[in-house]
């Protein structure tokens, strides 16, 4: 986006961020990446009963170049993983990924040779949605939580700072495999 | 690699073009059509282009890759690349109990989960030799759920087929009606999709109170709604122009390619396993086998529409029979096979019925032992193999179940109708136009979960 | 000590089913016992303290049937005269075991003979029996006669060292993708297939996944400090 280069950093950026964030989340177009059963639930959430159009999201763009959100809906097989990565790469910034269903989040019930155990092995995921398949209401809930993230995404220098902060936090965080105990 | 255009220069980091042993490969990124036409004019195969459609594509009905060789707008060769949804379900089932296998196989053809479960369970029941002992209520419930599933699957077929040719209203009304069916499924089985409900020996649990009224309301409502599809599509000139004469495959072609289901019935041959080799008591229901005689996409559409009406008839008859079967058992009497759980709606949703827990913990030692053995070890199925196919909405779906006497399937292979029917893509598309490829595939109605398993 | 157990009784008297009693005659399906179960409860993967660990039971598959098979089974068997290695009749289904050299001719007769007319082939299913030495890979064909409304099963075997079976695509084109899938998953090479390539797995995948010696390939699952091994490495009852 050109606006953040033109404005001096810090000046009025918070208002601009607010407006930009609102624009992005209110018209947040998903890319069609329906794979298996979750794809059907994704289609029904675009259907009349659970209407995604009220969030401005009923246009599922076939071309990833025009999409903001990739909803990976369904099990990603080893053969499909490079295709998934290529579609993700073809999307323009800013982009978000929602892993819909347990198969996309972690491999689901298919702990075997053919399924990638979670699409976060292939693309960075912003929102995980468990369920097999998750109900359309659950999908909408995940999308609305993602809308919060989108709304509060920063621009320009603030975004670079935010990315640095998130990365250092992630690098210093305790890995899940080292978390012991009941974790209640 | 001397040529102009962003694609061939490899400027686009994420979608570079390249020169391969098969000739030049263009990856199109937009606004560079002239580079393609220039490149094409240079080559010897100046007129023929190999186009790759999918696997991510809105119109290929799932993750199907189509490799089309085009000469202008005509398709000279069409090939399918499948396997993008291969999940290794069959191998996974070899490491799970017989009952747990139901949860796996139900996710193969995810638009008709009850059929996957039914064919697998019928194979197990044949090996166990309890086919005669399945209670009548379980059989009627199986038929009821399978026919409701047929309606919902045909609705998706018509809806997505309509969407792929641009008729978006068909999509919205198709999914609207499908919601009604899914509500019924949720009421009876607890889940909207991928229910592991049909289990060896019967069904998982009894009908909840009030289900029959809901079913009857549904039937009345569908009788009013189904004619909407006919009114919208049957005589619609654009619909007919897109579908009539497209994807032609006559009876000889169908039999050579092993095609079954609506595609076969659209040639005029009324082969329906529910009539010819009935299972689950289908011989006691009154319904007609729907055929059409044009062997094209339009015929398949009409066959599916009429089959939905016939399914409604069967659902009505099943509901009538269920009304007289209040309190009947839904699982086989042999406690060493019958899945022991009972579910009930509690304060926090559906879960174990407290009455059932009280009875097995407090009253019945045998109940406790059976529950324990069945849940941890499972029952053993005598060695042998069985193949009991059912008539799924897409054709003949059969599970070849091999047992070696253990608690797990030794091999469970599913002969999926979508897998076999999709072989007809080449025959149906070659010689036609690109747009017709989409219509032809939509008329086969493949579900990639079943194709790739 | 071997404790033999017959798991079921097909339409033959039980005595014939004990492994050493099945006649190993030329042209019949010999020795239906494949594999052995040892230990009680079939527990594998951790200590069995029941004391019954010494139990050894062979798995006995349904044995060979003898004429008359009953009903229309005999008509079909007559049509296949001379080509059949063995016949098994179990739970109302008939399986013809056929040597791979005779497969094409048998399929030709089944498809073309007036009395047989098995026009519809439902596809090939591969099964891998690692303990059935010399006949490890089985290819199972289900044939349907729409004219006569009958179903039969053909079973063809081949050893691991020489996994070739003639392709039925010239006779039943529907087997095209099914044979590719069976090659992909089991390594059975179908001679005469127009293009035997991988269909489900990626084109450069090594190995044949659905064979019994191919691991399931799962990963251990960790959750809140506890780890569960993948399904093929867990303690199990089998």
Image (spheres, coloured by chain):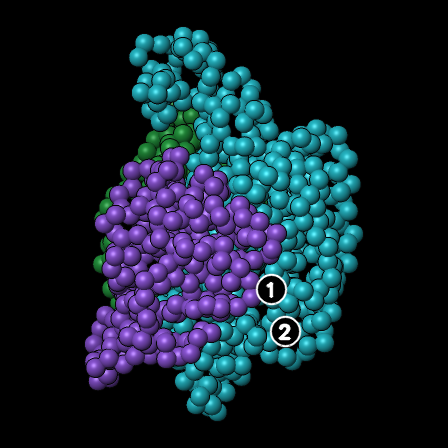
Residue A125 location, x and y as percent? 38, 44
Task: Give A174 or A89, whichever is nearer the viewer.
Answer: A89
Give the letter of the green chain. A
Task: Give B37 or B314, whichever is nearer the viewer.
Answer: B314
Up/down of B303 relative to C87, above or below: above
| Separation (CA) of disc 2 from disc 1 | 14 Å
The colour chain B appears in is cyan
Which structural element holds mark 2?
A: helix
Q: Chain of mark 2?
A: B
Task: Give C101 or A11, whichever is nearer the viewer.
Answer: C101
Residue count near mark 2 (Cα–Cα under 10 Å), binned few <14, some 14–19, many ≥20: many
Residue in view at x 67 percent, y 49 percent:
B270
Which image quadrant is residue B402 in? bottom left
Q: Which of labels 2 and 1 is toward the front?
A: 1
Using the image, tell me which numbered label, if any, was put on residue B279: 1
Q: Which residue is mark 2?
A: B137
First of labels 2, 1 by sequence position: 2
Which image quadrant is residue C227 in? bottom left
């Amino acid at each position: 986006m050109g606006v953040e280069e033109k404005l001096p950093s810090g000046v009025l950026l918070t208002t601009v961020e607010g407006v930009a964030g609102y624009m992005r989340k209110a018209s947040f177009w998903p890319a069609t990446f329906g794979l298996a059963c979750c794809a059907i639930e994704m289609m029904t959430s675009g259907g009349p009963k659970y209407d995604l159009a009220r969030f401005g999201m009923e246009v599922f763009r076939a071309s990833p170049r025009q999409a903001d959100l990739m909803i990976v809906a369904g099990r990603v097989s080893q053969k499909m993983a490079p295709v998934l990565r290529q579609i993700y790469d073809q999307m323009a910034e800013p982009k978000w990924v929602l892993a819909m269903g347990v198969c996309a989040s972690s491999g689901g019930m298919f702990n075997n040779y053919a399924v990638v155990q979670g699409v976060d092995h292939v693309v960075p995921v912003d929102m995980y949605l468990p369920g097999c398949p998750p109900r359309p209401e659950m999908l909408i809930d995940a999308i609305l939580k993602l809308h919060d993230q989108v709304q509060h995404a920063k621009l320009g220098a603030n975004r670079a700072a935010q990315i640095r902060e998130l990365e250092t936090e992630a690098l210093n965080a305790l890995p899940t495999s080292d978390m012991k105990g009941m974790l209640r | 690699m001397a040529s102009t255009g962003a694609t061939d220069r490899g400027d686009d980091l994420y979608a570079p073009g390249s020169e391969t042993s098969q000739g030049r490969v263009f990856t199109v990124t937009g606004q560079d059509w002239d580079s393609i036409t220039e490149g094409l004019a240079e080559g010897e195969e100046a007129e023929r282009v190999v186009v790759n459609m999918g696997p991510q594509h809105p119109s290929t009905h799932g993750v199907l890759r189509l490799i089309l060789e085009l000469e202008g707008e005509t398709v000279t060769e069409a090939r399918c690349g499948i396997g993008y949804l291969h999940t290794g379900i069959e191998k996974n089932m070899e490491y799970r109990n017989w009952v747990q296998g139901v949860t796996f196989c139900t996710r193969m053809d995810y638009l008709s989960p009850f059929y996957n479960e039914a064919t697998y369970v019928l194979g197990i029941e044949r090996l166990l030799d309890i086919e005669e002992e399945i209670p009548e209520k379980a059989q009627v419930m199986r038929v009821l759920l399978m026919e409701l599933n047929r309606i919902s699957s045909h609705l998706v077929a018509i809806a997505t087929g309509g969407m792929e040719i641009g008729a978006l209203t068909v999509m919205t009304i198709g999914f609207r009606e499908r919601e009604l069916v899914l509500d019924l499924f949720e009421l009876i089985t607890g889940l909207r999709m991928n229910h592991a409900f049909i289990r060896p020996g019967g069904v998982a649990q009894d009908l909840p109170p009030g289900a029959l009224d809901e079913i009857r309301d549904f039937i009345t409502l569908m009788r009013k709604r189904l004619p909407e599809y006919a009114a919208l599509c049957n005589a619609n000139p654009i619909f007919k122009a897109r579908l009539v004469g497209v994807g032609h495959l006559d009876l000889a072609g169908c039999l050579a390619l092993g095609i079954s289901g609506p595609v076969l019935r659209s040639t005029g041959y009324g082969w329906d396993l529910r009539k010819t080799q009935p299972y689950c008591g289908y011989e006691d229901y009154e319904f007609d086998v729907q055929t059409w005689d044009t062997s094209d996409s339009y015929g398949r559409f009409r066959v599916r529409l009429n089959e939905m009406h016939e399914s409604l008839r069967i659902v009505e008859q099943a509901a009538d029979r269920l009304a007289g079967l209040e309190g009947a058992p839904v699982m086989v009497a042999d406690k060493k096979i019958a899945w022991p759980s009972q579910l009930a709606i509690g304060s926090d949703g559906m879960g174990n019925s407290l009455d059932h827990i009280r009875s097995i913990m407090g009253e019945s030692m045998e109940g406790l032992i059976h529950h324990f053995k069945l849940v941890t070890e499972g029952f053993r199925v005598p060695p042998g193999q069985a193949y009991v196919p059912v008539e799924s909405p897409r054709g003949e779906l059969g599970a070849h179940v091999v047992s070696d006497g253990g608690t797990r399937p030794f091999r469970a292979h599913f002969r999926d109708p979508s897998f076999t029917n999709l072989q007809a893509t080449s025959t149906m598309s070659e010689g036609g136009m690109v747009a017709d490829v989409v219509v032809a595939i939509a008329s086969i109605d493949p579900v990639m979960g079943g194709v790739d398993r | 000590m071997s404790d033999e157990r017959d798991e079921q009784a097909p339409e033959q008297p039980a005595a014939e089913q004990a492994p050493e009693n099945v006649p190993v005659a030329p042209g019949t399906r010999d020795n239906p016992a494949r594999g052995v179960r040892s230990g009680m409860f079939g527990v594998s993967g951790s200590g069995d303290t029941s004391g019954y660990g010494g139990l050894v039971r062979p798995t006995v598959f349904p044995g060979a049937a003898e004429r008359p098979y009953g009903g229309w089974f005999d008509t079909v068997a007559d049509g296949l005269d001379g080509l059949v290695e063995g016949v098994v009749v179990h739970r109302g289904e008939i399986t013809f075991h056929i040597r791979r050299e005779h497969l094409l001719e048998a399929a030709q007769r089944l498809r073309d003979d007036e009395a047989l007319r098995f026009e519809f082939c439902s596809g090939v299913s591969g099964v891998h029996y690692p303990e059935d030495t010399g006949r490890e890979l089985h290819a199972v064909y289900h044939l349907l006669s729409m004219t006569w409304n009958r179903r039969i099963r053909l079973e063809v075997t081949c050893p691991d060292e020489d996994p070739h079976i003639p392709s039925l695509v010239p006779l039943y084109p529907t087997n095209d993708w099914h044979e590719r899938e069976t090659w992909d998953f089991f390594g059975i090479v179908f001679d005469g297939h127009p293009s035997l390539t991988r269909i489900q797995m990626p084109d450069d995948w090594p190995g044949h996944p659905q064979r019994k010696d191919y691991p399931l390939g799962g990963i251990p699952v960790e959750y809140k400090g506890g780890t569960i091994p993948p399904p093929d490495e867990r303690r199990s009852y089998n």
